[in-house]
Image: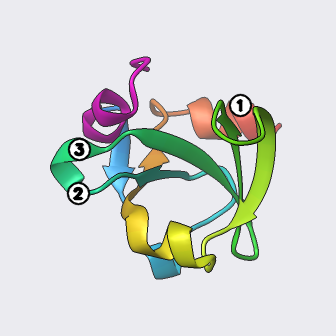
Amino acid sequence: MPRDAILQAEWEGAVEVDRKDLRAGDLVFFGPSRQKIDHTALYIGKGAIIHSTVLNRPGVQLGTLDAARTERSLVACRRLVYPSGAEEARSA
């Protein structure tokens, strides 16, 4: 997986998913526009995300997708795609 958020959002190892269909483990991307994605978070379920930041309070932060700032800047949701058979091995 690429290091930068914009490249992660475009990476072929993940597929687009609608916000209403998010599952724990999906990636959510933020930025001023789809062409300027600058942050990635991990969806952990029930509207919550976890992400690392260096702004304001550096470190790992918990947040929600319904927070006003988050709601305005959410631009993409993606789900990792596993090679055939890998999903079963991962859940075993």
Callout 2: helix, strand or loop? loop
Q: Which mark is residue 89?
A: 1
> Which mark is nearer the camera, 3 or 1?
3
Q: In the image, is 73 to the left or to the right of 32?
A: right
Q: Which mark is residue 71?
A: none
Please tell me which residue is depicted at 75% across the width and 32% down the height of the picture. 58
Residue type, numbered disc 3: Lys
Q: Nearer the viewer, residue 48 or 38?
A: 38
Query: Is residue 7 highlighted in magenta?
Result: yes
Callout 1: helix, strand or loop? helix
Residue 68 drawn above or below residue 77: below
Please tell me which residue is depicted at 43% across the width and 51% down the height of the picture. 29
Give the magenta range: 1-11
Q: Position of residue 10 (x, y in %)?
A: 25, 37
Q: Which mark is residue 33?
A: 2
Residue 29 drawn above or below residue 58: below
Which of the two labelled residues, at mark 3 and mark 1, occupies the earlier sequence position?
A: 3
